[in-house]
Image (tube, rainbow, N blue to C red):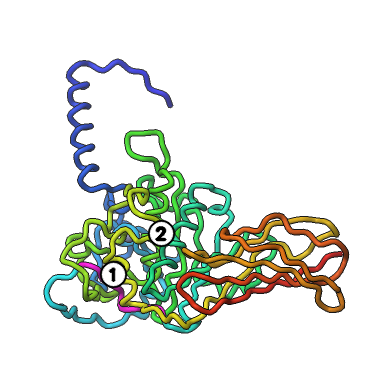
Amino acid sequence: MKRTSILSSFSRIVCFLLLMLTITIFSCKKSAELDIAQDSTINIDPSIIAKIKALGFQTKGITEFQEYYIVEGDIMISKESLSSTKSPEKLMGVGGRISQASTNNLISSISNHNINISVDASIYGDITWYNALKKAVTVWNSTSNSNVKLNLIYTSLTDYSLDPTNIDIVIKDDNNQLGSDEVARAKFPTDDNKPGNLILINRNVKIPFTDNYLNDGQAAWNVIHEIGHCLGLRHTNWQTNDPPTSIGENLIAGTPTSDPNSVMNGSTGLSDYSAYTYPLLPSNYDAIAISILYPVNNGSLVVPYISGNKYFSPYGEDYFKMSYLAQGVSYHWRAIGINGTVYDETIGTFTTETTPGIGFPASGNYQLQCTVSGGKYTTPVTATKNIVVQ
Ligand SMILES: [Zn+2]
């Protein structure tokens, strides 16, 4: 509803003062992401509140969803996990107050820390958030001393060369589950040492006092942050934001007593990654933190995938996407005939992950090959995808 009332001078002054006050709060908190405006805990079963309290989380502002609870703004606790919680672990100081922190559960080294992120159509179809995701993945993958290898899998394309059970994280629109001032939420790693498996993005959030959605840099900041949670990083400012919990605030050595540039600070939903140097993490201490959790093994292999159509008609054409994005990586594409089809065509070498339009001249069976080389891993790897032209 559009409002065009004329305010009395008194109420105009009150409104002005309120506006100034709110601007002041926003300018020092930089927050649209995590603040709980109201206490939604009152509708939660007291036994559940007790369990969440026993885990050490704040009990103000708990929100219930079908399969999980949200605590402290953007942390998901699955209902399933509440029935099998670990006993609280004592925090051990490492040379005084240290800010960057990890959860107790971390990701195992199975698959050489290859982590597959399914890109839901709701994100793929949104240019701001899709670009933010690509940027965020490139940032984490390019962190020189970390072994994290994120792969983007396009479940919205008709065929992707990956068993769906190998998807580790799904990123998708929140479908109106999040509050109007909450940008995103993510899950922490599980006690079977898998990454947190869900990131929800609220694409409807607007910058306060404007009619503008988050810009590209703000979107990128938020996706970098939420992926950090899925990898086991808690908020860097946990000492002021979150109390110690049995989920764990395991202090990470080599990080400072406070770090205003950390992408993992809580309540930073309006921070803008454009102010930082791509593809570096905003704070070098973020890079140190992830590298201590998952130290790089330069000899380890990326396990990449090709997303795109499997079935073509002769001279039909489509684009294909390579899953692994990182600084300094190039992609060499080739198509060969298989199962009796004679064909061998070098498509070319590119520095972006999406091919130009690729087609096949005649009915038959083909294999598309993409060799990924460059970047911090020394051994080139080749992903293949079989194509049927009929
Ligand atoms: Zn967070």
Question: In the drawing, what numbered circle is on residue 301?
Answer: none
Tell me the residue that label 1 is attached to. 52
Report whether 128 appears left or right of 6. right
Rendered residue at 39%/78% (across/down): 296
Q: Quadrant of the N terminus?
A: top left
**Of callouts 1 and 2, which one flags the residue occurring earlier in the amino acid sequence?**
1
The residues colored magenta run: 99-107
Q: Quadrant of ligand 1?
A: bottom left
**Residue 348 pos. (x, y %):** 67, 62
How many numbered discs, if any? 2
Tell me the residue that label 2 is attached to. 279
* Pointers 1 and 2 in contact (C-beta within 8 Å): no
Position of residue 219 relative to residue 283, above or below, is above
Closest to the observer, 123 or 55: 123
**Residue 86 pos. (x, y %):** 31, 82
Q: Identify which amino acid the numbered label 2 is placed on.
A: Pro
- Please, which residue is most extreme toward the left here? 96
Q: Identify which amino acid the numbered label 1 is placed on.
A: Ile
Position of residue 127 relative to residue 149, above or below, is above
Which image quadrant for residue 285? bottom left
Report whether 186 appears left or right of 354. left
